[in-house]
Image: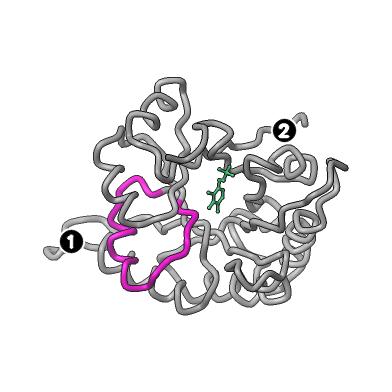
Amino acid sequence: RGRPVRLVAVSKYQPVDAIRAAYDHGQRHFGENYIQELTDKAPQLPDDIAWHFIGAIQRNKVKRLVRVPNLAVVETVDSVKLAQALNDAVEQERGMGADGAEAPAAALRVYVQVNTSDEPNKNGVAPAEAAALATYVHTQCPHLRVVGLMTIGAAQHSHAGGANPDFERLVACRAALAAHPALRDAAPPVAQWALSMGMSADFEAAIQCGATSVRVGSEIFGRRP
Ligand SMILES: *Cc1c(COP(=O)(O)O)cnc(C)c1O
């Protein structure tokens, strides 16, 4: 498409050997869905991997999540309460050392998850609520930095290619946020925020719609064990 698109290799349920094989071929961004699995695997793998957390988050596990030193982005922030919990955990777990010697940690990068398909079994805020949550993170969570939007979307059962209304909804959502006064001073500017959408079955359609980042698992690793 004449622009770079990030590939996040989704490695949930995959053994560390499979992840290392992809790493040895140059892959650096990997996605995991479960905090326990990520905290088990991350220490066994190179620390220049950029981990993307893409699963549902129980608030009582956020401390363990933010302790992963090479956690690059949490893609699944879908409530004010979760944003608060992550912000507090980063402050406590990554902030000043007890003796005050350590420099404050950099903010944790997050995406707002949007339920573009309006399906009750999918997480994410409604598109109309995305601006409020992004504004909350931007203005009230000094230890977080909102830098993107993420969606799953409904499986499209047509072979029409291209058009996917859910992916188009995420693009429209970012455009609406870009015009939002409270987000005017966001950095990077909202117009440059990541759009994380597209999985094995629909990553090509997502790229056609404007995805900046695709999350592909089984198409890379084969069926999950
Ligand atoms: C598992 C998962 C993926 C990857 O799915 P595949 O169909 O294996 O490519 C992408 N995104 C999320 C949120 C997932 O849970």
Q: Is residue 49 above or below residue 144?
A: above
Callout 1 amino acid: Gly
Residue 10: percent from left, percent from top: 49, 42
Q: Is residue 64 left or right of residue 58?
A: left
Residue 74: percent from left, percent from top: 47, 57
Residue 184: percent from left, percent from top: 68, 66
Q: Is residue 123 above or below residue 32?
A: below
**CA gap, disc 2 to disc 1?**
41 Å
Q: Is residue 83 above or below residue 50?
A: below
How crowded pointer 1 is (Cα within 10 Å; few <14, some 14-19, many 20+) is rated as: few
Q: Which residue carries the number 2 mark?
A: 3
Q: Which mark is residue 97?
A: 1
Nearer-the-camera pick, 141 or 127:
127
Q: Quadrant of residue 215?
A: top right
Numbered disc 1: secondary structure: loop
Image: magenta residue range: 53-71
Residue 66 is inside the magenta segment: yes
Q: Is residue 26 left or right of residue 91?
A: right
Q: Residue at x 47, y 52 (%)?
A: 73
How crowded pointer 2 is (Cα within 10 Å; few <14, some 14-19, many 20+) is rated as: few
